[in-house]
């Protein structure tokens, strides 16, 4: 069980509330949000979007299994091209790979498209270990748009 997170119409995330109480997530949504929108450390050969040589990532990446985050942040200054969509799909699939490794999912399918100007739509379908499916969609906004 996780504290539930929600994405608003502006692409921002917040803790979901039920009156004065926190909502909880019994499913996969919060795990997917954290996986997609936590910055993973850039690979040595990744082109960074800024000149500050910040490879990002989280200090606990070296010590934890499971959620590692994604490299979607590398696209923050990308142009609206098919290559950007392909990279977003690859980064999202990579971020959700741990669902397969941990036996949470049998399959993870990711598709992407241009949701709106400067916004990538990320569509996820997960077939869970018990054969049921979970699906949701999210947006990632480019800063260059």
Image (spheres, rainbow, N blue to C red):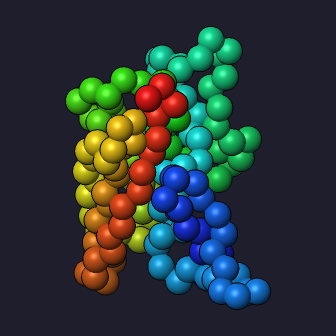
Q: Is residue 100 visible?
A: no
Horizontally, residue 44 falls left or right of residue 120, namely right
Count the numbered circles shown: 0
Q: Is 108 placed above or below 118 here?
A: below
The image shows residue 123 at horizontal and vertical percentages of 31, 57
Q: Is 77 placed above or below 1 here?
A: above
Residue appearing at x 32%, y 70% in the figure: 135
The image shows residue 12 at horizontal and vertical percentages of 58, 54
Q: Is 103 placed above or below 90 here?
A: below
Q: Nearer the viewer, residue 43 or 62?
A: 43
The quadrant the N terminus occupies is bottom right
Q: Is 4 placed above or below 91 here?
A: below
In which quadrant of the rendered view does residue 140 lie?
top left
Residue appearing at x 29%, y 36% in the figure: 85
The image shows residue 145 at horizontal and vertical percentages of 44, 29
In the displayed image of the protein, which residue is found farthest to the top? 51
Q: Nearer the viewer, residue 78 or 32?
A: 78
Q: Nearer the viewer, residue 49 or 100?
A: 49
Q: Is residue 50 visible?
A: yes
Residue appearing at x 42%, y 62% in the figure: 99
The image shows residue 5 at horizontal and vertical percentages of 59, 68
In which quadrant of the rendered view does residue 105 lie?
bottom left
Horizontally, residue 69 falls left or right of residue 126, namely right
Q: Nearer the viewer, residue 11 or 136?
A: 11
Horizontally, residue 13 falls left or right of residue 80, namely right
């Amino acid at each position: 069980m996780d504290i539930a997170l929600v994405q608003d119409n502006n692409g921002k995330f917040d803790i979901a509330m039920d009156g004065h109480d926190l909502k909880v997530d019994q499913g996969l949504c919060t795990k997917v949000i954290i996986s997609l929108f936590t910055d993973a450390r850039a690979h040595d050969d990744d082109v960074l979007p800024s000149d500050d040589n910040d490879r990002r990532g989280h200090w606990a990446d070296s010590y934890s299994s499971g959620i590692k985050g994604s490299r979607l942040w590398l696209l923050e200054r990308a142009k609206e091209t098919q290559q950007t969509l392909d990279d977003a799909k690859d980064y999202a699939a990579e971020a959700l790979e741990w669902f397969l490794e941990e036996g949470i999912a049998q399959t993870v399918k990711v598709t992407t498209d241009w949701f709106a100007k400067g916004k990538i739509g990320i569509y996820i379908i997960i077939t869970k270990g018990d054969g049921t499916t979970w699906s949701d969609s999210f947006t990632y906004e480019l800063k260059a748009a």
